[in-house]
Image: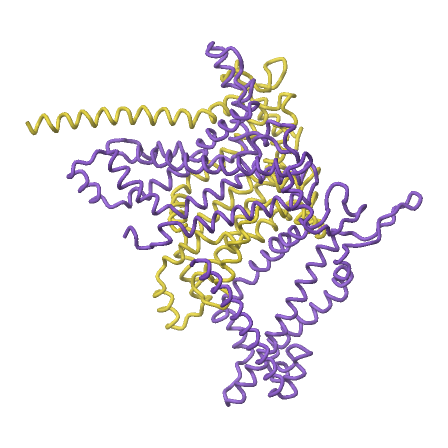
Amino acid sequence: MANTKGGQKKKNAIADFFSMLGKDLKEIGVTFKEGDFKTKISFLIFGFGSLLRGLWLRGLTLLAAECGLLYFIFSFGWSYFSKIGSLGTIATTKQGRKTVYGDNSFLILLFGLLTLFAVIAFIAIWRINVRVNRNEELIIKNGRKLPSNKDDFKSLFDSNFDKTLLALPVAGVFVFTVLPIVFMICVAFTNYDANHQPPSNLFTWVGIENFKNLFSFGTAGFGGTFVTVLIWTLVWAFFATFIDYFLGIAVAMLINKKGIKFKKLWRTILVMTIAVPQFVSLLYVSKLFANDGLINGYLLKWGIIDQAIQFWVNPTLAKITIIVVNIWIGIPYMMLIATGLLMNIPEDLYESARIDGATPWQMFVNITMPYMLFVTGPFLLTQYTGNLNNFNVIFLLTQGQPKTGNLVGGAGRTDLLITWLYKMTINDTNYRMAAVIGIMVFVVTAGISLVVYNLLPSVKDEEGFQ
Amino acid sequence: MANTNTGSMKRKRAVGNFFGYVLLILISLIWLFPYFGLLMASFRSFDASIEYGGVVDYIIPHTFSLDNYKFLFNGQTNYVRWYANTLIISIFVSLFNTCIVLCVSYALSRMRFAGRTFLMRFWLVLGMFPGFLTMICLYFLLKQMGLTQAGAIPGLILVSVASSGMGYYVCKGYFDTIPKALDEAARIDGASRARVFFQMIIPMAKPIIIYTALVAFMGPWCDYVFASYIAFGHDASYNVAVAMQRWMVVGDYQGYFTRFCAGGIVVAVPVTILFMFLQKYYVEGVTGGAVKG
């Protein structure tokens, strides 16, 4: 039932897309047919119509965009883009003592993609250019007055203020987030690794070989390691999120309790863990638990143990220690959030429960927790996905150690997917598998978010607790 | 009868409070212990004739000395330079990030334009890719612009600022709570969107501006991964996190531990004091952000 509904939705979306495309094409055709010579020339020379109609501000902007993009594509981008099918064929050779550099696969892929985006931008601006001409003609046809250059300029701070505000942020995200992500997704389909490093070596497309490698469970395959690391990642995120959550609420309730004084002092002490940069506090704590560290030192001195506890050496113990240390990190944060929320619970709910003779525990289970879970549902979800990618805690505490020979790709026993990805990038320069792991992290995060988000009571039923 | 009842309740409460205090004191001790240890270790000399500068099994140093602090500032290492680097990055990132987040939040909260929901969904999906995935690509992008190694400081600022637009959630959530009727009244009086933004919304958004700036300021102090990659091998471009992590991991066996502790104290104290002063705004931002999800 749900499936067919989804299918229909998809079909509708596709149909919508094509009908929109059809409408667009028709409008472009009509613009050309009904347009005067200024409009027709504008199809080739952007902004020509606007310029001749006296609107030089938008005309020049369009023209400049066209010239700039064309210049970029033909003088710079094309030489890279034309080789994107093979990622370069001319190998770097050594002639005598001189190195003659051939193609650089890395730059071919990077600038090839950039050129591709430039072509898409070119088409989009062409479309805007056509629409601008169409609008101008319609205004003239209807006998209205065209906006002046001054109006155009002013609109950037009024009706078009969103474009002014968003231009820089969107461009920044595009260059430094979108382009690199698309690039790395492409790398997942190449053999870019330690043996294929530009500029001395070429790399090329290998199809889905890397993904096959990830799911191959032979001795050299990544399958076994991937499953092990993935399970630990999920388990870690589960404990890190929920233990901190419940303990954080408990501490907040303790501080909020009637009759407890110096509330601000207690909170401030806890909040210090947020304020002190983690690389200071976590690195110190990691030494605290070391074999020759303070904790073992005192336990030995007091004669409680006669051998150092292997906090970071024993895999199971290391995992437990990480989760415990993370409580130290997580409680203050959760306590802050819970403090605010607990005060929002209507006091009369407790009042009437007390009259009915409810014990504090019953009130906690039946009033406090349902309210908190309802309100913080989406927050818990973001906490969980955040913990899946919690690089700092793992890296600063154990760097993924203890090491083991049973896992491939340099993974240690406490490595999360994200720290494993980091190690593969830095230590092994195995970019092809790092890219694949990165995509898997995305799949896991997005999958969990999507499923859980739709199950959340506060999303299903927004009015539920009001 | 009624009297004894309230009496027993009072006693019960007193007992409850007693255990509450015991628990709170215990918690405080656990939470403060690492800082106490850090502070104590920072006063232990690394001079072999006095004491050992590595990890030891006692907490109070046998003799207090300022050797570690002297070491930081006597020019033997680039510590002052690293500190300045981090401070510069933090200040610029904090400044630019706040501006960008404000712009994005206003546009998304107040204006309705084609592609608005698409943009928000697209950025949400982008945010689910792990940040380190793109590290090598960013490195080579920056290298093309000459912003690695010696130019790592502007490079780090650029990368951090460029993608800051995606972190608009808390700020937009705050803007959403400012009634739209205010905007509309101003617009009827002839104010442009830009004027509404600069003269009405921004003055009202003081708490969220402080929150955004504070969070952005604290970020670079912990930035280890990316900073170490971009500045690779160029000592003068390190930030404190990169440089001191190396003391801890590489110099561990030469007794660099106490020097790390002293350096950590010098980093932590100003940042913590700043944070404590602006704590109110931080709590407001975090709580607001959590409820809206």
| Residue in the picture at 45% in, 39% down | B275
Q: Is residue B26 left or right of residue A184?
A: left
Looking at the rendering, in which quadrant would you find the N terminus of chain A? Answer: bottom left
Q: Can residue B285 be seen in this view?
A: no
Q: Which residue lies furthest to the right in this view?
A: A96
The purple chain is A
In this rendered view, identify the residue nearer to me: B253 or A182: A182
**Residue A395, picture quadrant:** top right
Q: Is residue A354 left or right of residue A270?
A: left
Q: Is residue A148 left or right of residue B150?
A: left
Q: Is residue A373 visible?
A: yes
In this rendered view, identify the residue nearer to me: A123 or A4: A4
**Residue A110, picture quadrant:** bottom right
| Residue in the picture at 47% in, 60% down | A6
Q: In this view, does A116 lie above or below A386?
A: below
Whole-percent x and y of residue A82? 77, 62
Whole-percent x and y of residue B77? 66, 30
| Residue in the picture at 29% in, 40% down | A368
Whole-percent x and y of residue A354? 18, 38
Q: Which colour scheme is used?
A: by chain
In this rendered view, identify the residue nearer to me: A241 or B265: A241
Q: How many callouts does the rendering have? A: 0
Chain B: drawing colour? yellow
Q: Residue furthest left?
A: B1
Q: In this view, does A415 lie above or below A69?
A: above
Whole-percent x and y of residue A56? 62, 78
